[in-house]
Amino acid sequence: MSTQQGQDAKFFQRGKIEEFRAELQAAEAKDKKYQKRKIVLKKIVANITMGNDMSPLFHDVIQCISTPLLEIKKMVYLFLVSYGRSKPDQIHLVIPSFLQDCNDRNPLIRALAIRTMSYIPIPVVTEALSDQLRHCLKDRDPYVRKTAAICVAKVYTADPRKAERKGFVELLRDMLIDENATVVANAVAALSEIGDRQDGVIFKLNLTIANRLLAALGESSEWGQIYILDSLLRYVPEQHADAEMMAERVIVQLQHANSAVVLTSIKALLYLMNYMDNRRLIEYICKKMGPPLVTLLSSGPEVQYVALRNILLIIQRRPTVLKNDVKAFFCKYNDPIYVKLAKLEIMYRLAREENAREVLAELEEYASEVDVDFVRKAVRSIGRLAIKVEPAADKCIESLLKLIDTKVTYVVQEAVIVTKDIFRRYPGKYEGIIPSLCENLDALDEPEAKAAMVWILGQFADKIDNADELLDDLVYSFLDEPAEVQLALLTAVVKLFIYRSQSEATKALVHKVLKWATEDIDNPDLRDRGFMYWRMLAMNPAVAAEIVLAEKPAITTDSDRMDRGALDQLLLHTGSLGSIYHKNPETFIRNAAGRALIDSPALNANSRAVLVTLARPQLPQMAISVSGPGPVEPARPSQPGEAPSNLPLPTIMESSLSDERDLLDVEGDDGAGGDSGEGYPDGDDDGPVTKAADPYASLGGAFGGYVTDVPQPVAGGGSRGGDLDDLLF
Amino acid sequence: MAIDGLIILDPAGRPIIQSSYTTYPAAYPLLHIEALNNALAKAPREGSVDPVIYVGELSCSSACCHVEVGEMRFIATISGDADPLIAFAFLHAFIEILHDYFGTVSVATLKDNFDIVYQLLEETLDSSGHPLTTSPNALSDIVLSPSLISKLLASVSPATPGVPSARQGGYGAFASPIPWRKAGVRHNHNEILFDVVEEMRGIVGKNGTTLVSNVFGKIESNAKLSGTPDLTLTFTNANVMTECAFHPCVRLQKWTRDNALSFVPPEGRFVLADYQYRPPQSAVISNVPIPLSLKANMDMGEFGGTFALTLTSRLIKVMENLELKFYLGEDATSAQCTLSSAGSSVGSVGSADGSWAFDMRTKTLRWEILNMRSSGSWILRGSWTSKIKAPRPAHAFQIRFEIPSYSFSSLKVDQLRLSSETYKMYKGVRMRSKGSIEWRW
């Protein structure tokens, strides 16, 4: 079908191309004000925009390039942008016109010429361009200068080393102090693009330049402000005072109307806070960040979605930010589902003893809604709320029982799943509700819910009078159950037997299940577990009881927070795709450069304790360091271990690359590439020092899912800074 | 790496115009279009597709950010660690520009002016994904709007074909020290108009208590002023505005220092400021009172239900275009209602000011009251039927209304001063309010 179509389209085009060619030729005669040619060119451009291949007209179209009408020139240039690169053998015909236009009186034409040339990565063109570009970077007209700045990034992409040798990077750096703010912003954009390349020079800012850029903020367009604010992450403060002063100037930008400017300002602030020591100032900044974030929620659903995903990250790192604003995240009935789910997660994060009542009331409301996904998440959130906020647990249980009474199957199943965790969080407190759960045994048809219920039956078999009957019923379909349920049944039956080893019926039941598990089942996990239980029970039932009914560690929701170091790192990507999916971009985007905090004397101890180091050390003191010609030219492609794939592999590249970069860096960077976490003993027991290994291991399920956090056992001593203050830094 | 390009899709999901994507494989834009169309086709109901769709194929992982405009969809494809918010901000800016150029944005206008759209794309988005110039004032110098082109064609005498037409407009935009304003604007009649629009968003709980209600304000301006006018706008009660966000032209320091808006405006329409209204007595909980009340008597039965809704205005002003929407659930089949009104405000009683309709497609009951005078009550009684025994209607009504010449905050302009220019200008301020309330039952 599609090939058929493709052929048809080809016929169509061939006819068209002949037609256009004839029209263009005819237009050469008696073309008053070039109107005829304009009309034909317009038709050709129309076909380009619709994706039709007009490249056979190359020769005919470029004849029009010297027409002194700007509109025609523009269309010829549009044509060249589309097909220039595919005509390496004919492109030289256009070069004289390019050169002429680069020196035109009209700055628009000069800019148009260099821009178009930069889109055509063919050696003759780039060669001609690099001579012209040098003049244009110093053109008297700011429109030409700002266009030239962006062109440098393109020239650099074509051949980085050559662009460096020709001194373009220095020329670009000089533009950072241009008098025109738009030019400054574009120079920053170009340098950032170059700096983000893995084979690019390092782009870093020193205090003086950073300050000058901040001064240019006021006169920049909104996009310029975004580039400038984003580039502040390339400045590493050496003293707390520098970071504080800079933050104060960024705060003003929170009053911007463009949502992207606001979020980029917040990103810069979050970054700078790592280098501050003044508790009150940090608190002040956190307070200032809240309202603009809430304001983003009054925009369209798309912006809301991006904002919400970012807020979720921000409040995990800086819980004071929206501490009192949980109401801003109440879901409306006609919010799109993706907005609702994101809000729900934030509501749970913001829930505390003080607002638990309000939050619970909302969650109950959502549990009666129509959308199944949303209702499930709401029910689950009620359970998680019970686990998180102890004083609210009673109310939450009440509400879960009410929901179980509704007999709506998916509601009941979610409720059962969370109830299991509640039992583990508050042992001995809520077992009284087990009978209500048992009433709904037949309604459970999802593996997770069924497994949860079976676990409850086994764990509390001593308290449930008819546990043996219930389990006996459930075992009936043992062989047809999914593995998750089979495992749960096996364990539950063994527990039952340990509680009631006297009962003959129980003995028969456990025997039957163990026999099935070890003889009729293919699943190796199930078989192994079956054998283990069997041996234990056979050798020494008393020891078996001790093992099987051993005290379970209580669970908490503290550990559902992301690892601090990983959070710090993710927050450097605030606003980006990485922050939407809660994954570091280099883990799922090809060629993305990772970011990490850089150590400096100003980095505060708390951030340093969880510092994640990265393959590529970024930007310490110097404004820009450019490698000169000579032996220290980076030779990345020959790196061992890197060759087979294009994916950045931080751990492998770490040692080799950082050494090399040190050589490039004029002032040297003192060990920013090394494991700087080691030099500083872990001051407080607030989280372990994260090694460079793989801090994202815990984020596995984060992609696409909204609930990343299944309750987990309390780690070690359990003093994981649960309260807000510990996270202030 | 940032925004790689922009694609505009027609209502059927076919591309109308797309940027050149020169450095990408030909399949690249197609993959994104396909990803979006697939997601839309799979969506259970409208508006449930994530606005950022991850496209992992073709080894260059990227994402597709999309917004709906009329029946069209605008896609910005982003790759690398790009910022979706920049993509959305850019899409909105671009759509604004199209509005500016063509008045309306529709398939027809875009197809008629594709060459201009294409030029605009080239001018606003660099091929490596940097948004460039999106300020309409500066753009109008580089890309001529359709009306200007025809004017130029008419005026240029046939004797001088050699003059590049761009000189006509003067390319002063980038020479001007102010990026949002071009130099040398002249008007015979100088005027600036401000529209203060305040929108209330609120949620009312089952028991009738207001859970959340916030008022977001916007000062929209339309300036036609000559030269470089330096304006200072002051308010008698600037303190009602909090969490302000300003157009880049506003001098932020001045606002922080003495609560005056000091700015050199762009030409034409722009949003000067956004703010949130905080009632003065706001200590901790600050809900702005909702100007109407709803009493809902709901009776859920088998295969349907009955309801009686009473709406009462709590405002002296007349509310206009009040609309109440009630989603009756996926399985609703029909609805029957009667309208009546009561209360002190005598006049035309009955169905004259109100109407209701049930939309089978969206399963939504809509009740409209064009003019809602103060202190009257409007009543809608009715019933609906459903295919299933236990119907699941929405547990909330969506209410929208407008209040002309009214502001929740009673924000008042004190004066507008013009310095640096000597002419007299016409000034105007208008207030308008609207609301969207979710009322649960």
Image (cartoon, rainbow, N blue to C red):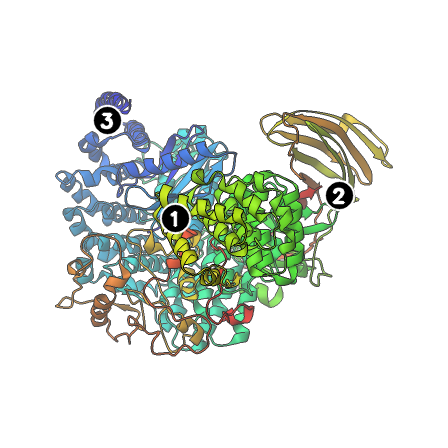
Residue B98 coordinates in the image, percent (x, y): 45, 38
Q: Are marks 3 and 1 on the same chain?
A: yes
Residues at badges 1 and 2 in contact (C-beta under 8 Å)?
no
**Cα distance, mark 3 to mark 1?**
78 Å
Quick check: can you spot residue B131? no
Q: Chain of mark 1?
A: A
* Residue placed under numbered mark 2 in the picture: B292
Dot 2, crowdedness within 10 Å: few (<14), some or many (≥20)? some
Kind of element beneath mark 2: strand
The kind of residue on which mark 1 rests is Leu
Disc number placed over residue A526 in the picture, else none? 1
- Disc tally is 3
Residue indicated by mark 3 = A24
Chain letter of the residue beneath label 3 in the structure image? A
Q: Is residue B157 above or below residue A2?
A: below
Counting residues from the N terminus, which is met first, the one under dot 3 or under dot 1?
A: 3
Tell me which amino acid carries mark 2: Leu
CB under 8 Å between callouts 3 and 1?
no
Tell me if residue A261 can be seen.
yes
Q: Nearer the viewer, residue A699 or B172?
A: A699
Q: Amino acid at mark 3?
A: Leu
Q: Residue at x 64, y 48 (%)?
A: A435
**Disc 3 and disc 2 on one polypeptide chain:** no
